[in-house]
Image (cartoon, rainbow, N blue to C red):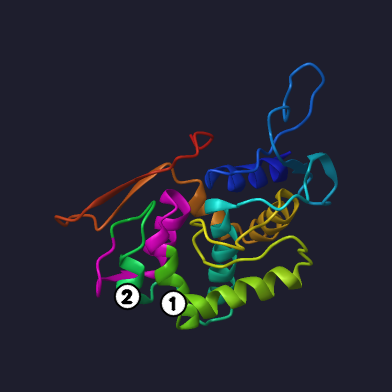
Amino acid sequence: MKKIFCLLLTIVLFLPIFNVSAENEGTGFGKNAKSAILIEASTGEIIFEKNAHEKLVPASMTKMMSMLLVIESIEKGIISWDEMVTVSANASGMGGSQILLETNEKMSVSDLFKGVAIASGNDAIVALAEKIAGTEELFVNMMNARAKELGLENTNFKNSHGLSEANHYSSSYDMVMIAKELVKHKKVLEYTSIYEDYLRQNTDRKVWLVNTNKVVP
């Protein structure tokens, strides 16, 4: 049950398009979901599914794949948690959810990752993507290559953050497979389980991060 909870916790964080729930007679769980899936994380056994392979817009759940690549890059020694990242104009100019990065600002990989895990910061994930691959476009190529490695047949990424773009899609099955891979890295749960925190503490540009996942105590 703990592994199932961790998997759900990771997915719920990203304001999912896909409603992950268990079908229980009389409760109506999954009734109004366009697509849904629930698996047992350790075995991959599908407990409940509904249109699980339908291609839909993944929105910020896209960041699960981005976070997976960040974690894997850290484990490979490509970047480190305390390494500083210089924010580009491209990253700072991102719309949607953000941590209000400024061009040429320097922030650690750890703080940027925190901004993604807690606040789903589009600017933060683009800054990390550019740090790892040089450009976001090259990072997206890495995302799609990793999706193929995982055997995902209904996923194609066009960006690292999930803002709407033509031919950017995934399925609830593919997303839960990404989540299953992501939670193998226990470090990510240290970040996603934070309810609130601050960036730029003790400065006049302090940013308060509050987790939108109400499951987090």
Q: Nearer the viewer, residue 182 or 140?
A: 140
Density class for disc 2 (Cα within 10 Å; few <14, some 14-19, many ≥20) is some
For the N terminus, the quadrant is top right
**181 magenta-colored:** no
**Left or right, residue 131 beside residue 5:** left
- Residue placed under numbered mark 1 in the picture: 130
Q: Residue at x 47, y 73 (%)?
A: 129
Residue 175 shown left or right of residue 134 in the figure: right
Q: Amino acid at mark 1?
A: Glu
Residue tagged 2: 88
Quadrant in the picture for residue 186? bottom right
Indicate the position of residue 148 as horizontal and vertical percent values: 74, 71
Residue at 61 percent across and 47 percent down: it is 11
Q: Is residue 210 above or below residue 204?
A: above
Q: Picture coordinates of residue 152 (x, y %)?
A: 76, 63
The reply to whether the C-beta atoms of the residues labelled 2 and 1 are less than 8 Å apart is yes
Q: Quadrant of residue 100?
A: bottom left
Span highlighted in magenta in the image:
101-124
Residue 161 seen in render: yes
Which residue is depicted at the point 69% across and 60% down? 181
- Identify the element where label 2 is drawn: loop
**On the rendered structure, is 96 left or right of 7?**
left
Which amino acid lies under the numbered mark 2 shown in the image of this protein?
Ser
Q: Residue 165 location in percent, x, y?
A: 53, 61
Residue neighbourhood size for the residue with mark 1, other residues' Cα within 10 Å, grouped as few (<14), some (14–19), many (≥20): many
**Looking at the rendered structure, which numbered label has been put on residue 119?**
none
- Residue 79 visible here: no
Between discs 2 and 1, the one toward the N terminus = 2
Q: Is residue 107 magenta?
A: yes
**Of 96 and 121, the residue lying toward us:** 96
Front residue of 118 and 126: 126
Q: CA distance from mark 2 to mark 1?
A: 8 Å
